[in-house]
Structure formats: C-alpha cells, structure tokens
Amino acid sequence: MYLSIIILPLLGSIVSGFMGRKVGVTGSQFITCTCLILSSVLMTIAFYEVGISASPVNINLGSWVDSEIMLISWEFYFDQLTVSLGLAVLYCSTLIHIYSIDYLSSDPHIQRFFSYLSAFTGGMLMLICGGNFFVMFVGWETIGVVSYLLINFYFTRIQANKAAMLAFTMNRSGDMLMSIGFFAIFAVFGSLNYASVFSLVPYMNEVAISLIGLLLLGGALAKSANIPLHSWLPGSMEAPTPVSALLHAATLVTAGVYLLLRCSPILEYTPTVLLIITLIGSTTAFVAATCGLLANDLKRIIAFSTISQLGYMMMAIGLSQYNVALMHTVNHAFFKALLFLGAGAVIHSFADQQDVRKMGGLIKFLPFTYSVMLVGSLSLLATPFLTGFYSKDLILELAAGAYSFTGLYAFILGSVTAGITAFYSFRLISLVFLTKANGQKESYLNSHESALPVVIPLLVLALFSIFFGYVFSDLFVGLGSDFFGNSLFIHPNNITIIEAEFSLAPIIKLLPAIFSISGAFLAIFMYHKTPEILINLTEYKLGRKIYSFLNGKYYFDVIYNHYVVSQGLRVGYKISKEIDRGAIELLGPYGLTNTFINTGVNIGKLDTGIITTYSLYITIGLLSLLFLIFAPVLIDTSIFSEIRLIIIYFASLILVLNPSKTYK
Amino acid sequence: MITLLILIPIIGSLLLIPISSEDNIENKKARAQAMRRIALTTSLINLFVSLFIWYQFDSNTTQYQFVSEFNQLNFAHLNFGIDGISLFFVLLTTFVTPIALLSNYSNINKNLKLFLISFLLLESLQICAFVSLDLLLFYIFFESVLPILFIIIVIFGHGEDRFRSAFLLFLYTLAGSLPMLLCILSIYSYIGSTDFQLISLCEISLDSQKILWLGFFIAFAVKTPLYPFIIWLPKAHSDSPLAGSIILAATILKLATYGYIRVLLNFFPDATNYFSPLVQTIASITIIYASLSTIIQQDTKRLIAYSSVAHMGVLVLGLFSNTIQGIEGAILLAIAHGFVSPALFTCVGGVIYERTGSRIINYIRGLATYMPVFTILFFVFTLANTGIPLTLNFLGEQLSLIGIWQQNPYIATLGATGILLSACYSLFLYNRLSYGSYSPHLPILKDINRREYSLLISLLIPTIIFGIIPNVILNPLHISTSALLYSV
C-alpha cells in the first residue's frame, strides 16, 4: 500500500505521457485523476496508520549503491512528518488535477500537461518518502526538472523559456550546495542514511555540523525561494495557473522546508545555523511582502505572498519550532492553492487579463470566486479561528516568547509583515472585485463563473482553509502533543511553547492582529476613499523611487544579471578567446607551425647565390668545426657531459629564434 | 575468449576486402548494403561475445582472467587478460562500435569500405589496448588508434579545417606519448620486463617513481584531455564525421582513464600520492575553465566536446582521490560519459546536422514543434549530461566528488561547481535548440527515423538501468579497485 502511494502518480504520468495518443485527452485526464484520487485515499489511510496510530513504516527495496563503506538502499520511510506533509501534497495535487481538466480544456498538449503534473506529484512523494539523502535527492531533482518543463509548458514563449531556465539554474545552484553537503555528511558520518546520521549528530564536532547545516540550508533556500535565491519564483508565474498553484504554492516550494524539518536533529546542534535561518526567514518575509505591496500582476502578488509565507516557515524553523513550521506549511498549501486557483478562475473568465489595474467590480459577476478568494485572503492574514491563524499567529508568539535577539527580530519583522500582508491582500481584493469596473466592456460581458471541475476544488480548498487549522491544530502544535514522535526533534533547551502560551503580555499577543486589521482597513480606505494619495505618491521623486524600487524587487535580478551572469559569461569568453585560442595556440600548435616555417625561411635566405657569402659560410663552418674538435682541450668541459652536443643545440636555436616576418 | 574478441572485427574486415565497389549503380547500392550489414553484424557478434565474458567473469578474484598468451611470437610478450577494470572498458568499446557504425549508416557512400574497415580495426585495436598485460604493447595499441583516426577525420570529415584538426589530434597525442615511451624503456631497463604483473611486484624508489610518473602523466593528460592540452579535442570533434566523434568521446578518451588506473595508480602509488595535489589542481582548473568556455560556444559539437572536457576533470578528481568511492565513481562516470556523450553527438551532429546542415546554435530554434520525439530523447540526454539522479552520470559524479571530499574538501567544492555549470550549458543548448518559436529560416523537418531512434534508445536504456542498479557494474569492480589501494 505504501509503495503504491508513490507509484500510482508515476504510473499515471507514464501512461498519460507515453501513451497519450492512445488514451486520448479524456483518457489521460481520467487515468491521472483516478491515480491521484486513489493515492490520496491511500495516503489518508497511511495518515491514520502512521500518524495517528504512531507506527512508522520503513520499506527497503534493495541495494542501490554499494561501494566500500558507502551503502545506499532504495529505501522509503513513512513517519509522522512524511504523512502530514504527504496529506497536503496529495490533496492539493488531486484537487489541482481536477481543476486543470476544465482550466486547460482549450489548450493543446493536454496529455503532456497531465503527465507532467502527475510526474511532479510522484517526484514530490518520492522526496518526502525517501529514506536516505540520495533517494530524497532523486525526488528533489525530479521536481526541479518537472518544474522546468511545466514553466516551459508554452514552450514557444520566450518569457516562459527564460523563467524556466532561471528557475532550473537557480535551483541547481542550491543543489550544488546540497550535494557538497552530502559529501560532507558522508565524510563525517560515513553514511547517508537518515537513521545513522541523525543518531550520531550529538557526538560530532560542532563546526562540522554547522558546515553541513549551512550547506543543506543552501539547497533549501533555493528550493523554498528564500533570499538570496528567491528571484526565480515570481518569474515562474509564466506557467499555467494550476502549475503556479501546485508547484509554486502548495508543494515544490515546501521541499526546502521539508529538508530542514527532516534535518531537525542536525540543526538542533548548530545554534549558528538556526540563527542564520531565522534572520534569513524574517528578512525574506519582510522583503517579499514589500515587493508584493505595489505589484500589479495578479499572480505575482500571490507569488510574493508565497515567498513571504515561506519566510515565516523558515523563521519558525530557525526558532526550532519545527511542528509549527510544518503546520504552517500544510495550512499555507491549502489557502495558497485556493488563492492561486481562485486567481486562475478570475483570469480565465476575464479574457486572460492579469493586471489588477484593469479589473474591478467583479464581485457582481463572479460572486463565488469572490467568496473563496476572500476566504483565502482572510486565512492568509491570520484572521482568528481560520486555518492560517493557528500557525501564523503561533509563530509570532513563539518568536516573542523566545526572549532572544533573533526572536525579537523575527517578532518585529513578522508583525510588520503581517500588516503588509493584510494590506496587499485587501488591495488585491478591492482592486479586482470591489472598485469601479476598469476593464473592457467586452471582457465583462463574457465573464462567467467557472465549470464544475473548477468549482469543486475551490470549494474543498475553501473548506480546508476555514476548518483545517481548527481541527488539526491541537494534534500538530497543541501543548504537549507527542504526535510527531521522533520524526521532529526539538532540543529541550529550545522548547519555548510554554513561555509563548503563558508568559506573554496580551498586547504583544494582539500586536500582529492589530497590525493586520489596520493594514486591511488602510488598504480598503486608500483604494476606495482616497485613491488620489497613491497617485500623488508617484509625483514626488522619493515616492517614485520607492515605487520603482519595490516593483523592481529590490533589484535582485539586476544584481544577478549584472554581476553574476554577465561576469561569468565574460570570464568564459576570456578563457575561450585568450587562453584556448590565444595563449595555448601561440605556445602550442600555431606557435610551433610558425616557428618551423620561419626557420625554414631563415635557412632558405642563406642561399643568396653570391660567392663571397658562401666563402663566409665555409670559413665560419671550418672555424666552428675546429672549435668543436678542440673545445675539450681549451675549456674545462667536465661540468657538461658532452659539450659538443650543447654547442650544436645552441647553434640551431639561433636559427630557430631568429625573428623574421611571419610566413603566410 | 579474448582472442575471439580481438579477431572477430579483423575477420569482419577481411570479409569486406574482396567485395569490389566498382560496378554499375544498381549493384553498387546492393553491395554497399551488404558491406554495411557485414560490418554491423560483426560488431554485434563481438558485443555478444563481450557480454558473455561479462557473464562468465568471476568478480571474487584479483587475478587477470581469460588470460591468453602467445609465446610463438618472440618479438613481444603478447599477453592478454581482463580484470574488473578493463572488463568495462572492453564492454564499452564493443557496445559503442555498432552505435558508431549505425550513426553514419546511410550518409557515407564514398569510400564506404575504408570507413567500415577502419572502424572494425579501431575496435580491435582498442580492445587490444584495454586487455594487453604488457606495458610496451599497451603503448603500441594506445598509439595505434591514431593513424586510423587521422584517416577517418581527413577522408570522412567535413570542413576545410579538417586537415589541421587531424594533424593536431595526431601530433598532440604522439608528442604527449613520447615521454611515455621513454619511461617504458627505462622501466624495461630497470626491471627487465614490461609485464604488468612483474612490474607491480617490483618496488620502485620514490625518486624514480616521480620521474616515471610524470612521463606517463603527460601522455594521459593529453589524451584525457586536461588543461592546457585540450585544444585538439574540440577541433577534432567538430571536424570529424559523427561516427568518429562517437568513438573519440566514448572510448578513445577512456584509454587515458584506463591508463591512469592501470599504470599510475597501480605501479607508482607513492608518486601518485606525491603528485595528487598537482593533479587535483589541474583537474579543478579544467572543470571550471572548460565549463565556463562551454557556456559561450556557438558550435553545438564544440559545445559538447568542451562539456566532455569538464566531465573528464571530475573523473580525474575521482581517480586521484585515493578512496574506493572516488575510483569506482570515476569508472562509473567514464562509462556514463561513454553513453551520454555519443548520444548528444548523435543528437546535434547527426540528427540536427543532417537535417539542417548547420551546427551553429543561433540558426536553429523551436525544434520541439516538428520533432517532438527527438526533443524528448534530447532532453533526457541533456539531463543525463547535467547529472540528474537516476542516470549513471549522477552516481559517477557524486561518488567521484564524495571521494575527493575525503581527500581535500576545497578541491571537492571547486569540482562541485561543475554541477551548476553543467546545468547552465546543457540546458542552454537544449532550450535554445528545442524551444522558442520555430525558426522561419528552417524548412519543415522530419522527426527522427527508426535508425536514429533505435540508436538513441539503445544509449538511453543502459544510462538509466545502470543508474538505478549500478551494482551490476560495481560488483566486479570492487576487488580490482580495492587491490589498487590495499594489498588484497
């Protein structure tokens, strides 16, 4: 049963991809969706067996690599962490598969699309179910490759190509760091199995552990789109919207978070890395939220919100609150998938318009979509008792309850970010749904609520966004819940849940909520009552600068393009031009050819046809010969074994090195 | 058994000789077809013989197996045998030769007999180089492939520059090998024999080892190739016919890999240890320089040739890591490169070049529109070239670098940049050729035909299968590689 959870999506992908022509569009949709639904059902059973009944499963399929002390098996491991995340992954994937049936109905290559989607789900499952670092890495790379293919789904568009390549190469730089991490893990522990590595961590040198933690963090930053490796995520909004929902909200980006959660036994012994993670996470949350503040592309706003929420997850990990981070990951998967799918429904029904400034007033035309988007947004900004509240608010409380510098940093930035999140969420809602109609009349006339395959996923996700947190919060993050058993390790020194629950002043607990409410009201006020302020903002020099700075995404792309990529290309050009085809050619073949030709020409020049020149040669030749014969008598040649040979060599060198015009 | 392996291609080429190619046109076509069939069948029979050897191979002994000795010939100690290391290089050779013959199956009509015979002979000579148990014979066979390659490039290559490329290939390798010959002679004068087993029994002092090591290293570094001896390779690749590129990438470069293991690691362990920082430096320079200059190449075949250089750098790092993982990883990478590099050459130098007549990246765009099957295969090989898990390249690269990390973490970090850079150049090539809107300057191209498909699929299957179960390769390797590092 456990293996079929992983195999079913892959099977669906293979059938849909390689036999797409045989099974047809409907067939491929039916097969992949059925596989996914079956897999979800099995995962639910697994959640009961492994999670609630607390009995982890280990499946060993045999040896993969066996080289001296390096023993790696095809090993799958299902524990509480796996099944909790797997539940979110499979539910979101299944719903998105169903959603895509309608959403892509007018596109070509539907079999290809469903094949990619299923392959992605399979890769993600392999990632979270892998029992050692190598099997995990198989899934890790699979989702990287499939995300390249999915972003590139409309492969004739240059923007899609660029975004896909950026995503892949940037992820690859994370993979490089992670691979180096594997090398280090193997060198330190002599094994790449989770069980062996994690049980040995306490006995190892802290510097080595910190290094490993940093390297793994590098991989996680790239996959989970945290600063400084985040800039691929907004670009990848070129993909069809279901892809954005699946990859760039619910599943792919959580892979990095999963890696860090899985490595909690390593991280717990490196305070340095934890500190760095918190700093990066809080900064990411803030920076991404400010980028989303003034963005105008509907999907990009949600993308920045994703990066910002990923920052929250990292923040929680850095504060050692792994179960809260996991809870937020799962919650975020549901409400962010909802937001993306809702955005997709809006875009699709409104003539593929993505610019929020050219929408407005859609509440009358798309009431259902409006309701689910509102639910998603409210859940995102942690409205009390909705799903997002149970994790996001707790993260901030835990940050405040840590009573440390990083905790304070995370709390302040996190609370401010909560306000900004509320602002851009309500900005989106009001610009798209509430304000005056700014779009074309034609689009309004054609706008319509979506078909049933779109409505069902939206409805289910909306229900999850409302109730999931309430139902599961006590299980996941409740005080004293031992649900996660050994799968997440929190060092006793780092447990701060008691302080967070009982020692904080009410004002601190309420601060994020106050920020959120004021942010939301500010957005509605500014975009409904006094839109002039925002227009006037760009009249001033400073305002315009801030506007372009935020919309330029803090110029990260510019920095990368200008200083990393183009410099790399320049160095490559230099190497190719000045070393390969320059120095090596000159010292090697080209130089040698020239020298030989020149020598030939030089020797040829001796043949002048004048008697007196020849007599000079004869005299010089005679003198040299005499010198050669008498040299051992005249000079002490014991240092050289054979002086005559050396003299002849030197004589020939004179001819070779004699400069002359290059012969052509 | 090994004699059979060597003789079958020679018999095949002898069969080809009496077929005359001067006749009327109708007959000529049929005869050409017959000649191709004979050559292909011969190479396939040889493949099956080598597979049988693999099946019969005993992986629990350090002895050379299937040893055959010819004492009747008194000018040299003709002595053949196989151990775990040479087994896979022989298999690679017998596997790649039919691929090479198939790759230019239909587009060579002039001098066809010469073409087929030279590839069959090349196969024999390479197998000889891999199985001979005598240093002098190894040198002779190591060099003997050069004239044939020279002929292949000069006669069947394209472009005006091919003469220069062929000369470069010839002279570079020949000049590099001269120190090796001198070293072999001095070994002979010290020990009185050039037999592998005898040399490995002798203790050579560190000072002599250093000098001998350097002599051999230059020869192998030119052949690998490592910086600064690389420039012959991209030239030779870009001007040789497709089959030549395939053989060159898959097996000729592996002669150097085999040489490193067989001679440097085996006979001069102290000098290897002494010089390994030097080698590691050169190899990491090779990885980074070659990768960076790969990114800006405009010629597809040159690009893949440069990427080969970068992969060879990783391989050398693995070999000189002084760990079992590193050496086994390097051998895995050698085998994987022997599958993937020919496949990429077939994609760009065969499929695309035959259809468009161009190898310049900028002229080709949007192939996915009309050639979907080809694009899928091309994509999988591109991924394999970047070392994605489930391909053999991944295991080779990771094991090599894991090995070198235990020796020197900094070098391993430098070597790991190859992981990122390989993704950059491979993906750029694939994306540029396959995606984007279809170039208006291209005619409507046909998707790959059955021959090309079977060619690529037969390279794809082993890459994936061995990537999932590498133990079939690793098991016979264990004892032989352990014998390099420990006294077993």
Image (cartoon, coloured by chain):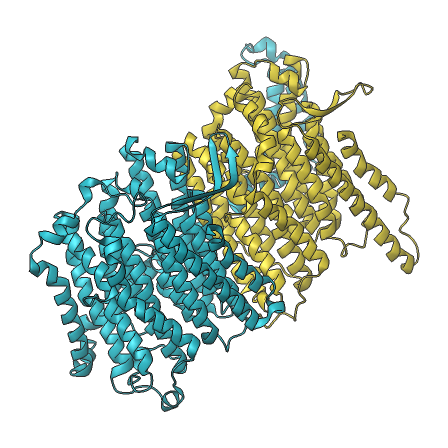
Quadrant housing the C terminus of chain B? top right
**Depicted A335 relative to depicted A396: above or below:** below
Is residue A211 among what the camera can see?
yes
Residue B432: image location, x then y, percent:
53, 62
Is residue A402 among what the camera can see?
no
Residue A479: image location, x then y, percent:
19, 51
User: Residue farthest to the right?
Assistant: B23
- Which chain identifier belongs to the cyan chain? A
> Closer to the camera, A65 or B112?
A65
Which residue lies at the image location 55% right of the left edge and 11% below the top edge?
Answer: A635
Quadrant housing the N terminus of chain B? top right
Left or right position of A136 against B378: left
> Closer to the camera, B219 or A524?
A524
Residue A238: image location, x then y, percent:
42, 69
Which residue lies at the image location 30% right of the left edge and 41% below the top edge?
Answer: A265
Left or right position of A637 against A130: right
Residue B194: image location, x then y, percent:
68, 19
Q: Quadrant of residue A252?
A: bottom left
> Closer to the camera, B275 or A92?
A92
**Depicted A367 relative to depicted A209: above or below:** below
How many numbered markers are drawn? 0
> Closer to the camera, A390 or A655?
A390
Q: Colour of chain B?
A: yellow
Left or right position of A83 against A593: left
Left or right position of A491 against A228: left
Which residue lies at the image location 36% right of the left edge and 77% below the top edge?
Answer: A354
Q: Quadrant of residue B18?
A: top right
**Depicted A570 relative to depicted B271: above or below:** below
